[in-house]
Image (cartoon, rainbow, N blue to C red):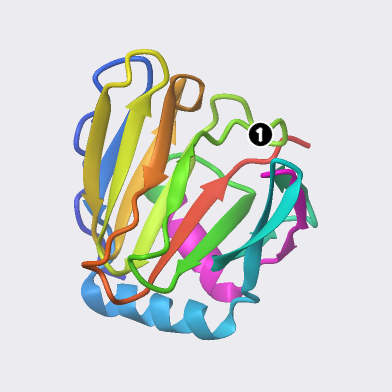
């Protein structure tokens, strides 16, 4: 397994949080191998959210895996974690070695094209370790990823490349929102793996 970029780019946020972008940590061949395997073998399901009391089923698909069948509630819906696959454990080990963090769960998202995205939000659910690290690995299409400060509204954006790692930690979720803006320029799919720590 070839790994790139031993050192992350320094914190891309100007204040009130910590987001380190490592760039590509997988070579193109390995990134494509994992993308193809996850696309075929993960138990994908259309993501759901309850907005203003109405159940919304998204085009985006999601899946939730972990050490145990952890319940994870976000957007007022609850998922129960499936057992790790071998490939997810391989990716988890790579990210843990790279960051020095440990994770016990992973939320995966499948975006079929650039027209599917994610609105402004923060990952501050009560199930998650407070101020814990979230390691985000991108596979497939390159996509823009943005942050917005909750008070000042200052924005910061980065292009997440295929095989790249971004780690959010510290007070990032408290002070910043993030999103994956939709775009008609991207026609190919993207898989995003966000490794997290559920408090037990």
Return the x and y of residue 7 as percentages of the image width and height: 21, 41
Return the x and y of residue 170 as percentages of the image width and height: 45, 23
- Residues in magenta, as a range: 75-96
Residue at 41% x, 76% y is: 34
Quarter of the image for residue 186 reads bottom left
Side of 18 where 27 appears, left or right: left
Quarter of the image for residue 155 reads top left
Q: Tell which of 146 and 196 is nearer to you.
A: 146
Q: Considering only vertical position in the picture, is 142 above or below 134?
A: below
Side of 118 where 25 appears, left or right: left
Side of 144 where 191 appears, left or right: right
Q: Is residue 108 visible?
A: yes
Q: Considering only vertical position in the picture, is 115 above or below 54?
A: below
Q: Secondary structure at mark 1?
A: loop
* Quadrant where the N terminus is found in the figure: bottom left
Side of 176 where 75 appears, left or right: right
Is residue 89 on the magenta stretch? yes
Return the x and y of residue 67 as percentages of the image width and height: 71, 56
Residue under pointer 1: 125
């Amino acid at each position: 397994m070839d790994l790139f970029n031993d050192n992350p780019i320094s914190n891309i946020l100007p204040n009130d949080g910590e987001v380190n972008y490592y760039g590509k940590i997988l070579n193109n061949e390995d990134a494509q191998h994992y993308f193809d395997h996850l696309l075929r073998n993960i138990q994908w399901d259309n993501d759901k959210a309850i907005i203003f009391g109405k159940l919304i089923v998204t085009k985006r698909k999601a899946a939730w895996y972990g050490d145990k069948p952890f319940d994870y509630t976000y957007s007022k819906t609850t998922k129960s974690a499936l057992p790790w696959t071998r490939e997810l454990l391989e990716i988890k080990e790579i990210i843990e070695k790279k960051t020095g963090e440990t994770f016990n769960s992973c939320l995966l998202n499948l975006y079929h094209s650039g027209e599917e995205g994610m609105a402004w939000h923060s990952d501050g659910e009560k199930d998650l370790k407070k101020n814990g690290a979230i390691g985000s690995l991108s596979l497939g299409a390159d996509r823009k990823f943005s942050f917005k400060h909750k008070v000042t509204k200052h924005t910061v954006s980065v292009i997440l490349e295929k095989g790249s790692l971004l780690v959010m930690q510290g007070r990032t979720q408290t002070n910043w929102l993030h999103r994956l803006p939709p775009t008609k320029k991207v026609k190919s799919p993207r898989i995003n793996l966000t490794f997290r720590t559920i408090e037990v």
